[in-house]
């Protein structure tokens, strides 16, 4: 009788090509998506060495990191990004790669566009020169972030060299209350276990909470696995996954679709599969979460206080430095802290379901006086769909900026940055010092918490509205 396998084992073994002398496995990559910040350098290296792209038909280019989000934008709107966009355009054309340029109706953030077009499928390997490639694990795919040298290797060989990750299964028990989301689950896991517990691992989420999440919510959950130190994250594909993918432009059709679904049903971990580590998180009664410090583990419920400083000398120093940077005091309630800006966007929380959730809270109301509020859809497709539903009007009537799709304030590579000491509640994935601008103070939260905060002008609990 065959040994039961985890989902990681199944995907890894199916894509295994060979083992290198240094002990790393060569893993075949089904499709990969490039972006404008790192791909130009890889194109330059290919040109210098006279090598070509092995499978241009499996490679796609996305303008997302450096593109301006102002309405009516072109490549000159963000002058600092123009050279990257031109290099991306030239390199993609030279190598015969499909480019989603600024004026493309499907342009957007790579981790949003790839799933919505069906470019990434259950059981597949998917590489992006960006750490949040793990997002597509919400479809049951192995999403791998890669550096520039690894990207060059993938472009020329269609493989990546890796050590097989260890496996962790996190079983999410209970059920989520209203206004509690996948983002809150991920932040709670980070608060419980820290930002490095998953180092060298692939994390599979299981249990009733994972099963109950929508596909888009699963992508949010998997998006944050890189912040847990892991290489990738998964939720096993199921009927929700298949319904989400059916009819997508790059998904199989007809008899090929039926055959694909039959294969995808086998991707989930087998009964009795052994993981290197098993963990359980009870989500019963979980409150909306928000970060108070400068890493994602420094998180509390939005109805709690900024934690009192404790632990060993190193932990105390870290907390003291975080409090000083964030301009906060231990023991003060998080709710009620004045906020200067709210940002709803990024590959973590800028899909249609995220915008709907925020708009439901904001509709008929207005952002607090003096507060800057921004919504940047994750893709042009999301933007179109939101506008068909009138969500853009809801946001604009409430005093929000409604932008074109792109990475925007996630890392500020397009010029969307906060001002020094500005306090921002953001739906992004990183709250490191200077991440959204010099000396900017970032609190990570869900779209629901961000929306409630925009209305109140202070950090607010959407359950109390």
Image (cartoon, helix red, strand yellow):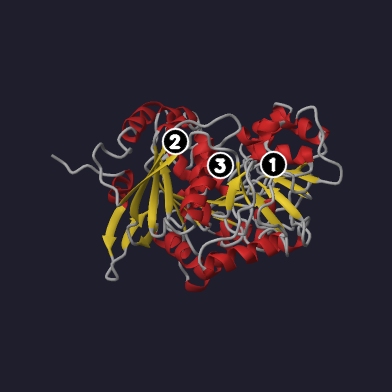
Regarding residue 237, the answer to whether it shows in the image is yes
Of residues 392 and 283, which is closer to you in this image? 283
Residue assigned mark 2: 210
Regarding residue 96, the answer to whether it shows in the image is no
Res. 397 image quadrant: top right
Disc 2 on helix, strand or loop?
A: helix
Q: Earlier in the sequence, mark 3 or mark 1?
A: 3
Task: Tell me if mark 3 has few (under 14), some (14-19) or many (20+) residues whose alpha carbon lies within 10 angstroms of its own.
Answer: many
Farthest residue to the right: give it. 369
Mark 3 → mark 1, Cα distance in angstroms: 12 Å
In percent of width and height, residue 370 lies at 86, 46
Residue depicted at 51% across the width and 62% down the height: 311
Disc 1 on helix, strand or loop?
A: helix
In percent of width and height, residue 257 lies at 39, 30
Residue assigned mark 1: 450
Whether the residues at callouts 3 and 1 have beta carbons within 8 Å, the answer is: no
Q: Is residue 30 left or right of residue 407?
A: left
Of residues 406 and 219, which is closer to you in this image? 219
Q: Is residue 225 left or right of residue 181?
A: left
Q: Is residue 358 left or right of residue 227?
A: right
Residue depicted at 76% across the width and 41% down the height: 454
Mark 2 → mark 3, Cα distance in angstroms: 13 Å
Residue assigned mark 3: 184
Residue 388 higher or lower than 411, as above or below: above
């Amino acid at each position: 009788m065959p040994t039961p396998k985890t989902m990681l084992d199944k995907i890894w073994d199916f894509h295994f090509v060979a083992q290198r002398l240094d002990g790393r496995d060569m893993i075949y990559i089904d499709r990969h998506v490039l972006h404008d910040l790192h791909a130009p350098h890889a194109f330059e290296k290919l040109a210098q060495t006279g090598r070509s792209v092995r499978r241009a038909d499996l490679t796609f280019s996305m303008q997302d990191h450096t593109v301006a989000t102002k309405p009516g934008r072109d490549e000159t709107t963000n002058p600092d990004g123009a050279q990257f966009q031109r290099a991306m355009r030239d390199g993609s054309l030279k190598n015969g790669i499909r480019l989603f340029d600024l004026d493309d109706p499907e342009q957007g953030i790579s981790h949003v566009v790839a799933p919505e077009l069906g470019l990434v499928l259950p059981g597949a390997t998917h590489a992006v020169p960006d750490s949040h490639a793990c997002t597509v694990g919400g479809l049951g795919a192995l999403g791998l972030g890669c550096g520039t040298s690894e990207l060059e290797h993938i472009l020329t060989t269609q493989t990546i060299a890796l050590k097989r990750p260890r496996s962790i299964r996190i079983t999410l028990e209970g059920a989520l209350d209203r206004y509690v989301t996948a983002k809150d689950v991920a932040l709670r896991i980070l608060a419980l276990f820290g930002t490095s517990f998953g180092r060298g691992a692939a994390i599979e989420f299981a249990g009733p909470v994972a099963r109950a999440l929508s596909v888009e919510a699963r992508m949010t959950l998997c998006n944050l696995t890189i912040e847990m130190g892991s290489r990738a994250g998964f939720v096993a594909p199921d009927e929700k996954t298949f319904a989400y993918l059916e009819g997508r432009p790059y998904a199989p059709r007809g008899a090929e679709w039926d055959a694909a679904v039959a294969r995808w049903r086998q991707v989930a971990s087998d009964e009795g599969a052994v993981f290197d580590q098993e963990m359980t998180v009870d989500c019963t009664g979980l409150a909306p979460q928000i970060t108070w410090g400068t890493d994602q583990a420094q998180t509390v419920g939005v109805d709690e206080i900024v934690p009192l400083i404790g632990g060993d000398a190193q932990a105390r120093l870290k907390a003291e430095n975080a409090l000083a940077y964030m301009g906060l005091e231990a023991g003060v309630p998080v709710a009620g802290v004045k906020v200067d800006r709210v940002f709803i966007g990024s590959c973590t929380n800028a899909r249609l379901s995220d915008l709907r959730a925020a708009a439901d809270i904001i509709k008929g109301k207005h952002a607090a006086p003096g507060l800057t509020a921004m919504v940047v859809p994750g893709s042009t497709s999301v933007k179109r769909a939101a506008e068909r539903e009138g969500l853009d009007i809801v946001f604009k009537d409430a005093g929000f900026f409604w932008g074109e799709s792109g990475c925007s304030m996630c890392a500020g590579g397009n010029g969307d940055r906060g001002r020094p000491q500005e306090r921002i509640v953001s739906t992004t994935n990183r709250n490191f010092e200077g991440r959204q601008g010099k000396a900017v103070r970032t609190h990570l939260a869900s779209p629901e918490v961000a929306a409630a905060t925009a209305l109140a002008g202070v950090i607010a609990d959407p359950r109390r509205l």
